[in-house]
Image: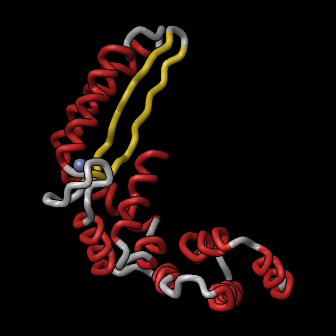
């Protein structure tokens, strides 16, 4: 059975701009080419940012090794979403934190993209929080606190590998956003800051 393109066209015409932009930047891989064509018409009709088409194209094809490299080096050169400095390349890091509330233990491993100094500061803060608040949940705090601390220490021996894997994953997941806003670096920095906060 074919897709009801007319119905889709009607639906898209009723979406607000934000939703159209979200589809264009994130969902192209899951859309039928005919549907992508409708989306492009809608972007044109509304006079939305024509760079959205670059994001659409980037998602519609397989990413090559050199394109992935280009995306990652773009990310690394952005200003730090945390402190704003741009004199050292951005890295990816894991923040591991355990907090216990007597019977409830919360363990969080968060991937972040930021500068070296901010990464160090955040990792240290998480270690202190974990050391102070992690252990006193019974029983999980007792297990997870040493686990988090040991894992943080072993992360530090694999910094480059971890950073590369976080940047790679981010680039693959957000190729549409990156290509759409390639020349608007402050928009990309805001996007990374938002991702860091909601991870
Ligand atoms: Zn920073």
Q: Residue at x 33, y 24 (%)?
A: 147
Q: Which of 122 and 190 is in front in this view?
A: 190
Vertical order, 171 against 13 (above or below): above
Residue 11 is situated, as x and y percent measured from the top left of the image, at: 81, 77
Q: Relative to 63, is 150 on the left or the right?
A: left
Question: Is residue 48 shown to the viewer in this render?
Answer: yes
Quarter of the picture containing the N terminus is bottom right
Residue 97 is situated, as x and y percent measured from the top left of the image, at: 37, 29
Residue 83 is situated, as x and y percent measured from the top left of the image, at: 26, 48
- What's the colour scheme? secondary structure
Locate residue 87: give its quadrant: bottom left
Q: Which of 65 and 132 is in front in this view?
A: 132
Question: Is residue 61 shown to the viewer in this render?
Answer: no
Q: Residue at x 28, y 80 (%)?
A: 66
Vertical order, 43 against 108 (above or below): below
Q: Which residue is drawn at 37% across and 74% down?
A: 184
């Amino acid at each position: 059975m074919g897709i009801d393109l007319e119905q889709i066209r009607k639906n898209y015409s009723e979406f607000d701009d934000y939703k159209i932009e979200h589809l264009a930047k994130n969902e192209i891989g899951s859309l039928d080419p005919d549907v992508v064509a409708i989306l492009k018409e809608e972007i044109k009709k509304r006079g939305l940012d024509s760079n959205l088409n670059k994001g659409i194209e980037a998602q519609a094809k397989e990413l090559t090794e050199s394109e992935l490299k280009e995306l990652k080096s773009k990310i690394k050169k952005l200003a730090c979403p945390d402190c704003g400095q741009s004199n050292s390349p951005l890295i990816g890091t894991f923040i591991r934190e355990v907090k216990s509330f007597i019977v409830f233990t919360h363990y969080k491993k968060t991937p972040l993209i930021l500068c070296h100094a901010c990464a160090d500061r955040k990792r240290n803060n998480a270690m202190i929080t974990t050391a102070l608040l992690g252990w006193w949940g019974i029983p999980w705090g007792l297990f997870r606190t040493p686990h988090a601390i040991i894992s943080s220490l072993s992360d530090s021996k694999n910094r480059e590998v971890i950073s590369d894997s976080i940047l790679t994953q981010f680039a693959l997941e957000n190729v549409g956003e990156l290509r759409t806003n390639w020349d608007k670096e402050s928009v990309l920095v805001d996007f990374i800051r938002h991702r860091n906060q909601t991870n």
